[in-house]
Amino acid sequence: MSLYPMALRLAGRRVLMVGGGTVATRRVPALIAAGARVEIVAPELTPALRGHVDAGRVTWSERRFEPGDVAGAWLVHVAVDDPEAAAQVSAAAEEHRVFCVRADDRDAATAWTPAVTRHGQVTVAVTDGGDRRRAMAVRDLVAHALESDPPAAPEHKGVALVGAGPGDPELITVKGRRLLAAADVVVADRLVPGMLLGDLRPDVEFVDAAKIPYGPAAAQEEINRILVARAVEGKFVVRLKGGDPYVFGRGGEEALACAAAGVPVLVVPGVTSSIAAPALAGIPVTHRGVAHEFTVVSGHVAPDSPLSLVDWAALGRMRGTVVVMMGLKNLPDIAARLIAEGRPAETPAAVVQEGTTAHQRTLRSTLGAVAADTAQAGLRPPATVVIGDVVDVGL
């Protein structure tokens, strides 16, 4: 069969989805993303589809299909496993000259949904004579090629603040990896996974932010200057930061500097090690019946310092989990302060060094002993400290 490929502009146009089960659940999000006015006709909906209805993204007629439902639709999707009911929808669509996609019988359909991969403004759709598996295999090959050597991306302008994740290079987001592959300039922190930098194109300008030869405050000013200057030159700049840009990453300062210079900023959140490092050590930061809250604090400033913004008294009173980032140097003072503020010395505690990487080390102790145990074990930064009963959940 020879097919005629076409891309549909569905924004503001009515699309009918007959059926409210698993297949409809998989297909409706793409229609919503295309801006279609989706109407679902089905006696029941999955919880995910009901969520779209509750949010006002789609409308729902809580009943079985009627032939008149097709009137006014630009496209019909049939997502029911009843052949007779599906045939009734097909017949109505044929009568109204509306293309109809059928999940139950591709040969009876007048339109097929292709295997799709999206990379920014580039959308690739693959259909192969009804051989769905082969189409998906070709789609995956194209997706890999686009990730490895993306096409020119004129839509990318200014600066993207991209979270690289907690250390494992595979934990960067799909969007973050795609933008990194399209970058003209990459400004990276020392905690960025090195494997990500190895994949950069040879012509990419790489700026190692850890080697800027100034004090911490002046170095941040220089990073801001570089981001703005390269963007003003018309280059697409990716500021690659370990974890998440806005979790103790000074991403807010860089975004403000760019905004002040009129440089557009795109923020791509990352997986933060405050959650990921404990998780990979078998510690959930929350757990039913154990902890209903968790607080993430920076430990780079000692508790007794006038520069500290942390309410240590409140942390000492709380029952939930406390996660301390950048706190190894001040861990003896932090532990002592929490105990003084009411947290029991026998509270379980753990330290996870270089979480999510091949060099991860985990130490389990108590709040009263964790500082001494950490020093004796020779643990070093970067490390995440977890304090609370979740440490003993035993995953």
Image (cartoon, rainbow, N blue to C red):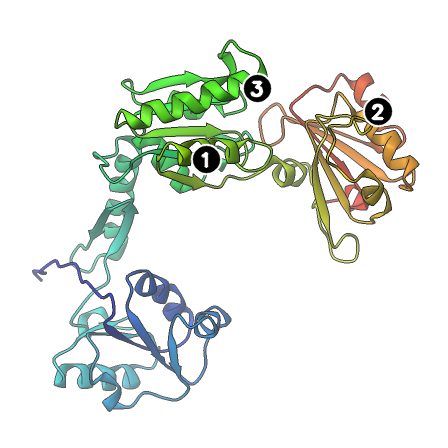
Relative placement, left or right, of 251 versus 339 is left
Q: Which mark is residue 326?
A: none
The answer to whether residue 200 is above or below residue 19 is: above
Q: Earlier in the sequence, mark 1 or mark 2?
A: 1
Task: Indicate the amino acid at tag 1.
Answer: Ala
Task: Indicate the amino acid at tag 3.
Answer: Ala
Q: Residue at x 41, y 21 (%)?
A: 225
* Crowd rating for badge 1 (residues with CA inside 10 Å; few <14, some 14–19, many 20+): many
Q: Name the residue nearer the viewer: 267 or 222.
A: 222
Q: CA distance from mark 3 to mark 1?
A: 16 Å
Q: Earlier in the sequence, mark 3 or mark 1?
A: 3
Q: CA distance from mark 2 to mark 3?
A: 26 Å
Q: Quadrant of the C terminus?
A: top right
Q: Name the residue nearer the viewer: 34 or 358.
A: 34
Picture quadrant of residue 37: bottom left
Q: Position of residue 359 (x, y in %)?
A: 61, 23
